[in-house]
Image: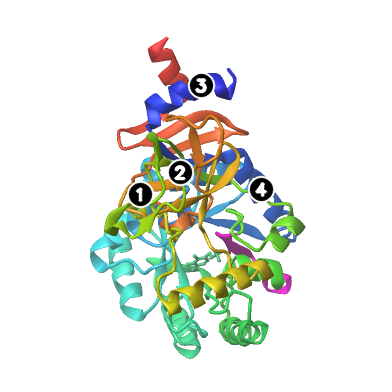
Amino acid sequence: MKRAALSDRIAEIVGPRWVEVDTAALEHNVRQVLGLLRPGTELMAVVKSDAYGLGAVETARAAVAAGASWLGVTTVEEGLELRRHGLTAPILVFAPPLEAEAPACLAYGLTPTVTHRDVAEYLARAARSLGIAAPVHLKVETGLGRLGLEPAAAVELAREMAAWPEIFLEGVYTHLATAGLNSAFVLRQAKAFEAVLVGLEDVGIRPRYRHICNSAAIVNHPDLHYDMVRAGNLLYAQVSGRVRDRLGLRDPWQVRARILQVRDVPKGEPVGYGADFRTSRASTLAVIPLGFADGLGIVPARSPRRFGELARAVTKLVLSGLGFYRGHYTVEVNGRAVPLVGRVAMQMAIADVTGIPGVRSGDEVGAPALRRVNTGARLPRLYTRDGVPYRARTLAGEITFDEWLGAEG
Ligand SMILES: *Cc1c(COP(=O)(O)O)cnc(C)c1O
């Protein structure tokens, strides 16, 4: 069935606003990243924060299908969601579990991060009561100033843990602060990390997984790939256009909506909360069911009223002309970029579609301005392969498209 013919079905399932994720593009990106790695270096797909908004479960499925051998999340709760949906790949939890979470973490085969001694101790207690020997990864703090053990303390704890039967050191890692933008700082952290590895080796410890690279470092520091890399942004093509082109990444994601109403209004009409935008001509306005609660962080067009606002507007114009500022003032209607006008509300925004022929309620709108991490968690996700829908995740749960069609037909 052609996408056009499915349009009504899609509307029935997901309603007037949705996040569309092309898992074929995700899989493509996973393969492109794998292509950057030496044989033997593994890829962890970072699917924390609902896979940066794309949907953790479906993204994890795609990543594993395309060759990622590990998944990474921040919390035990996020790991449990993946296990509940049948994902069996190893899952590293970046944040240390709370003591209360330790038994569930280990019982469901999530791999915890040890960031300090207490965590190691209560993980060992939990493992003992479960009667298992649990793998853990040790996090070294090398410059991000966040979670982890100082290098010397990391070596010391690893040495102690080597005598404990309940947990064993499967991995050691650190996290970079400068995302590859500041090479000198990356190398400083890498040096501190390397010193820990040497310290461990001196006492006879060589963990199976040593890992340090996030997306930027995967691209900029191939010499730091070690045994595994942890990629988030790269898989979701959230990188500069230059890197995206060089690696041949595809954009797997867009927010879409349907116009709820189209109105012709005269010149001088107030639009939106605060009535601080007025139409400067007879206009056609389209109401769109997306707002700031959905992550629509678009700054709406309105006439600058104070000098400061005017100066800012001019600066942004100049910077965007030079390519330094990506102002998000437009959505796409029938293939044309149109400005939002009036204030963006909680779940509504208004686009100026004056002069675009044939715009009707029900027409689709693309909102390229939404950032993944800000995308409202309650927006339905529609999963497609090369544009053909096969599954949706809505507030009602997960729906397979074939099932839906079958149930209806
Ligand atoms: C988020 C995160 C990553 C992935 O970072 P990207 O820049 O999105 O690739 C890797 N490691 C840890 C510990 C993280 O928290």
Q: Nearer the viewer, residue 33 or 234?
A: 234
Crowd around label 4: few <14 · some 14–19 · many ≥20 (10 Å): many
Q: Position of residue 162 (x, y in %)?
A: 46, 75
For disc 4, the marked residue is 250
Describe residue 338's horizontal placement relative to residue 48 as left or right: right
Label of residue 6 in the image:
3
Distance from disc 3 to disc 1, alpha carbons, whole Å, reads 37 Å
Q: Is residue 391 left or right of residue 69?
A: left
**Element under label 2?**
strand
Identify the residue position indicated by label 1 in the image: 269
**How are the residues colored?**
rainbow
Comes first in the chain, label 3 or label 4: 3
Indicate yes or no whether the magenta region holds residue 180: no
Counting other residues with Cα less than 10 Å from the Cα at mark 2, is it few (<14), some (14-19), or many (20 or more)? some
The answer as to whether callout 2 falls within 8 Å of ligand 1 is no
x and y percentages locating residue 304 in the rendered image: 44, 68
